[in-house]
Image (spheres, grey):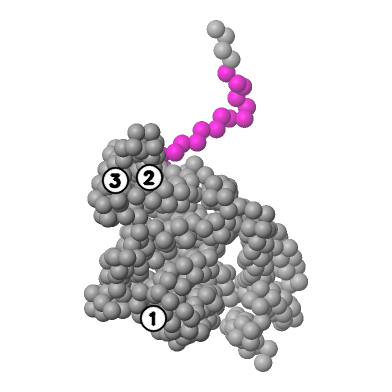
Amino acid sequence: MTAFLIENMAPIMFGALVVFLLLGYPVAFSLAANGLLFGLIGIELGLFGPNFLQAMPERVLGVMSNETLLAVPFFTFMGLILERSGMAEDLLDTIGQLFGRIRGGLGYAVVFVGALLAATTGVVAASVISMGLISLPIMLRYGYDRRVASGVIAASGTLAQIVPPSLVLIIMADQLGRSVGDMYEGAFLPGLMLAGLYAGYMFLVSTLFPKAAPGLPPEAIGFREESGRRGMTSLAILTLASAAFGYAVMRGSKTSGADFAVLTMFFAMLFAFAFAILDTIVARLFGLRVLSKIARQVVFVMVPPLALIFLVLGTIFIGVATPTEGGAMGAVGAVILALVKRRLDLGLVRQAVHATAKLSAFAIFILIGARVFSLTFYGVNGHLWVEHLLTSLPGGEVGFLIFVNLLVFVLAFFLDYFELAFIIIPLLAPVADKLGIDLVWFGVILAVNMQTSFMHPPFGFALFFLRSVAPKFSYKDRVTGLETAPITTGQIYWGAVPFVIIQLIGVALVILFPQLVMHYKGSAPAVDPKTIEIQIAPPDSPPALDLR
């Protein structure tokens, strides 16, 4: 029996952790308790000495002094302030008006705003709840299928997990030992790709089933000119002119990939905002106006969050700021935006600080528990057991990626992204590195996969967030006065299924087209270590004297 325990301590320890988690014990305490329990058993069996566990305090202190993790509270605070400042409401109202006449227009608006909220808030709960409160009643009012409406809202909210500045990417970078900036750059295009796939699904639904995603009636469209026209021409011209200006400014630069996209967007946004301000001043002084009402509304509503995106991502991508510094600037920017909108008060700040402290403490406790677990797991040669298990899979690198993604997808039914990042990633990363897989690419693949943990039953948090704000009973619509049926939990679950499939397609595309992520290397300085010469003067050589 003793020989069996010694030979199989690693799988027994991992199995015991799974049992604790399935029994419902808190993840942080399950990890720590397993580490300590099997640490005592390992000492008793002679697998390692008691002094081995003396490394534990150093590991815990390493967690507390990790500067990278400081970005987590900054980005969380930024997202919560923005969510409560009314930015989501303004964006959804304006973009909904912009796309409203098109079939499926409200669905496109939700996807578009979901991507913007993801790039500014980075918090799934804030995005899903905001869009559920604001967009869902409008979509039900104008006849959207309940499964389509609930699915697109929940899925668009989960973009906050892959579009920078995502919290999960910070955790992944820490666990993989890679730069947060590289993770952000690598995830930028896959995040936009997922948003595009969601919009493509809305196009298919609105084309094949027009009644499931109708356009808004003319009377529901606002921001019209005095003549009754919508004024879309001036918006289109301003958009093209802004894009041309941004491209012209960046055309001669040596940047590429996400750097080029973010900086081009910044200069285009700067041009549009300056032109809109100038047009407003001229209209007030001389009564002459070039831009339509909808064009000015779109500019003044969209530019502030886009400016915040550049402030956070742009400074990180071009190397001006670290992710922690970018998060601090984003938090300050969010407070300034809330002040400008006159929605910042002591109660809002107190709520944001309280929620930020809870989430940060949650992440830190899990990480400390994971450090305790991993120390003992390493002591019983668990890393060698995992390595032999995964490197012996058929198919080499491809077989490893397929197996790992299937494993993460199944575990996501029961664990959320924090738990997956802290428990599974440290076990998989050394094997991936040994197989020659780029760890940033590997991390983005798993981040897209782990996004499904928010969407599929029974523990899909995005579905629970939407369920909390979706109508549970029939109600009278405040605009039409008609009785509106509630949304059932089954409709929310079935609405999520197509988007889970889309997310899996996204995983496959990132695996098949690595350049979606690997472009991050193009922004790194190309220096050949062999060309670097280090010259050290002999210790006995006196310093040269200048006798001139």
Q: Alpha-carbon neighbours of circle 1 within 10 Å: few (<14), some, or many (≥20)?
A: many
Residue 226: image x %, image y %? 30, 51
Earlier-in-chain disc, 1 versus 2: 1
The label on residue 269 is 2
Q: Nearer the viewer, residue 178 or 376?
A: 178
* Quarter of the figure that contains the N terminus: bottom right
Q: Which residue is mark 1?
A: 147
Residue 204: image x %, image y %? 26, 74
* Local SS, label 3: helix
| Residue at x 62%, y 30% (from the top left corner) | 539
Please give the count of numbered marks on the rendered protein.
Answer: 3
* Local SS, label 2: helix
- Report the amino acid beneath label 3: Leu
Q: Which residue is mark 3?
A: 238
Q: Nearer the viewer, residue 73 or 35?
A: 73
Going by the picture, which residue comes out furthest to the bottom?
1
